Image: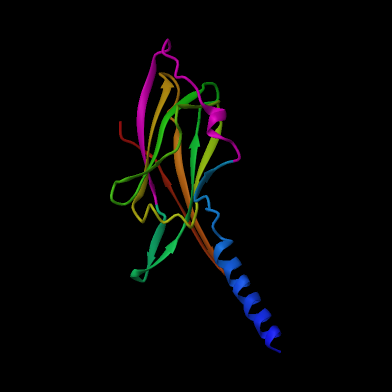
């Protein structure tokens, strides 16, 4: 009888130990499409006369409901789009900032290129609460003088039980 109780206690302790220590693997809280940024790295051609620009895109990692005390986390899909059907564009910076304007993360080490009509995505996972209700991106980009500027959009979504919400934002050129 004593051995059975001891075995049960040890089993329970091992079970609890496994639960608390088995979840140490960090969760990725921000991702992008199946592509890797390294696959898109490029040197910006210096022989071409390229125009540069800077675009601001608002992101909402959460929104308020009823009051400041109740909020809902959101997943944000940020879409970087080359709208030209003939020219490659270059994006040299994709930086994510929080509500206070503090840099959260840089998304690539070197400039990337997008082929004509190509799109890549950055996903801010619902569990990533770093941004807040006033999060934003700053993108810097280069195109040839006759190429349309890239399009930066975000779709924020949340699905809970039988309810869902979604809305979009579009980038605004600031330089």
Give the total number of marks visible in the rendering.
0
Drawn side of residue 93 relative to residue 17, left or right? left
Expressed as whole percent of the image width and height from the top left, the position of residue 164 reads: 53, 63
94, 22: nearer the viewer: 22
Expressed as whole percent of the image width and height from the top left, the position of residue 46 reads: 41, 13
Picture residue at 36% right of the left edge, 55% below the top: 132
Picture residue at 56% right of the left edge, 31% below the top: 118
59, 27: nearer the viewer: 27
Region rendered in magenta: 34-59
Drawn side of residue 112 relative to residue 49, left or right? right
Picture residue at 34% right of the left edge, 70% below the top: 69
In the image, residue 159 sits, relative to residue 60, either above or below, namely below
54, 92: nearer the viewer: 92
In the image, residue 18 sits, relative to residue 26, either above or below, namely below
**Residue reaching furthest bottom?**
1
Locate residue 50: give its quadrant: top left
Q: Quadrant of the N terminus?
A: bottom right
| Residue 126 covered by magenta stretch | no
């Amino acid at each position: 009888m004593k051995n059975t109780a001891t075995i049960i206690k040890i089993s329970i302790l091992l079970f609890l130990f496994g639960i608390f220590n088995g979840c140490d693997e960090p969760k990725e809280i921000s991702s992008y499409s199946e592509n890797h940024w390294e696959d898109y790295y490029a040197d910006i051609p210096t022989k071409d006369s390229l125009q540069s620009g800077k675009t601001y895109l608002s992101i909402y990692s959460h929104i308020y409901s009823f009051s400041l005390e109740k909020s809902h986390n959101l997943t944000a899909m940020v879409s970087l789009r080359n709208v030209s059907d003939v020219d490659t564009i270059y994006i040299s910076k994709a930086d994510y900032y929080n509500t206070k304007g503090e840099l959260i993360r840089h998304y690539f080490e070197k400039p990337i290129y997008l082929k004509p009509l190509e799109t890549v995505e950055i996903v801010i996972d619902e569990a990533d609460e770093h941004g807040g209700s006033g999060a934003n991106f700053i993108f810097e980009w280069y195109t040839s003088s006759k190429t349309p500027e890239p399009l930066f959009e975000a779709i924020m979504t949340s699905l809970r039980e039988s309810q869902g919400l979604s809305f979009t934002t579009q980038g605004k050129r600031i330089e």
